[in-house]
Image (cartoon, grey):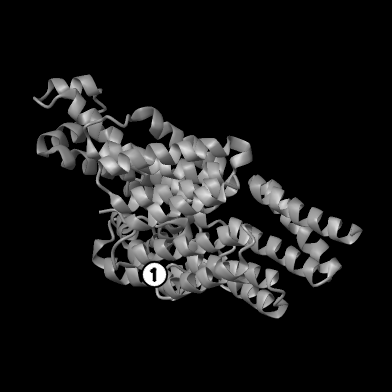
Amino acid sequence: MKKYISTELVQKAQSGDKRALRDIILRSDNLIYKTISAFRLATESEDLLQEIRIKIIENLPGLKDPRKYPGWLKALAHNHCINLLKKKRPLLLSEGQEENGGEDGQPSILETEGLESSSFGEFEKYEASLEHKERIEKTAKAVGMEAFLLLDRAYVQGLTLEELVSLGTLKKSAISDKIKIEGARWILEEANQDWNVADYKEARSKLLNILFQFTPGDESKDKRFLLASALSRLGDIHQVQGQIYGLDKSIDFFRRAKQIWDNLRDNKMAAYATHMIALGNNIAENYEQALKILDEAKEGYRGKDGHTKQLLGDLERDTASIYLSMGKTKLAQSQIEKSLVLLETVDHRESYYAALRKKGEIAIKLKHFDRAYSAIEDSIKESPPYRALHHLQAKIAKVELFLASKEINQALKYSAEAEADCKKFGFLHQLSRLHEILSQYAIMRQC
């Protein structure tokens, strides 16, 4: 079974997270073994696996684009296998020969192993074909052995779906449905990766693709789950980029998602959708309504597992944020302490960092400037740089802090950086907030 390696996991490992590095090593084994198998080096597989693992640890910090980890690993494993073949068969593949053919015109080791070129591009195509076959087999197994045999024949012989159906008794719709579901799962995974690195345009395009494929009334639970997941993530995107895509649309997406989650009896995800509807009302400055909806969401966050505790911690933080917007600073301070107590015990540091930042924002209002600076700095100290929205919000908090403490040059520095980030990622709500803070300071100076 293929184990997914997210961009987020790679970035955590690069920043020194030992648990993330261990997970990457373990999840890479399948791809490493596949490469070793392609070179028919099964007898050396265990030694090669350990050697390639060491190379991952040594070279991972130098990977510039974490999103390219799978291709980078393929090249790493490929080159290591090539080097072993050079040592094993120096007469056929020596340092003085071209890797695509020997001096005597005989096929190179790559050609005899079924790889017509040693170039990374060609090897990547070969690996892609193996992954394609693996996905077809995985899909076929889900519908039974008959489908497995039929799709395998289609892959090897290149038969069309109609030709494939004519060879057996399985209906065309049964095969195409399973392929459709499997494809949508992959699209959702890729969209979530795009979301993590703030590539919202690409994520939105992929998620809309899922919306066009499925309907809320579909009898298939898998399809409804994928549709609800896509709607929820689209709601997230429209919320952070409300002035680009429309905040009302965000609330609409979450309402539609909640109906499906309710139908699937997934109380936690239905509560999450309600939670996000409340945040939409907070952005629209409907504070009383937002608090009321958050109370409804809280009812759905029941359970003692880590994820539920994280969601509850996020809810307490968001309640503090609403109180802060309403000018109820003491209530906000009380709520943020509840949030931190919940979040410091769960394995989701991003939520904890966000709560620390909010603690700093509250301290600014209370004129506790040293505490505010300390909390904001702690919130970004270990937070991965790809968490663009969090780091932007921290910069805006620093602008407010330095304006309040009359350190104007520092405020202007962070203001320029924050404005550039807002425009780069399309965080237009945050840009409005930044301008509001600057305007308030200008009004105060005039007074």
Q: Residue at x 56, y 72 (%)?
A: 382
Q: Residue furthest right?
A: 446
In-front residue for pair 90/433: 433
Is residue 87 visible to the viewer in this orientation of the structure?
A: no
> Residue 95 location in percent, x, y?
49, 61
Q: Is residue 145 visible?
A: yes
The residue lying at 44 percent from left, 58 percent from top is 73
Q: Which residue is mark 1?
A: 53
Say which residue appears at 52% left-offset and 70% top-offset.
336
268 is higher (above) or lower (below) than 380 = above
Name the one closer to the observer, 81 or 309.
Answer: 309
Task: Choose top left, top right, bottom left or bottom right for residue 321.
Answer: bottom right
Could you tell me how many numbered marks the image carries? 1
- Quarter the C terminus occupies: bottom right
Q: Is residue 444 above or below residue 224?
A: below
Disc 1 crowd, CA 10 A, few/some/many (<14, 14-19, 20+): some
Q: Is residue 385 left or right of residue 304?
A: right
| Residue positioned 14% across, 35% down in the render | 149
Helix, strand or loop for disc 1? helix
> In which quadrant of the rendered view does residue 395 lie?
bottom right
List x then y, in percent, for residue 46.
28, 70
Q: Quadrant of residue 392?
A: bottom right
| Residue 124 place in picture, x, y as percent | 43, 46
Tell me the kind of residue under disc 1.
Arg
Image quarter in which the N terminus is found: bottom left
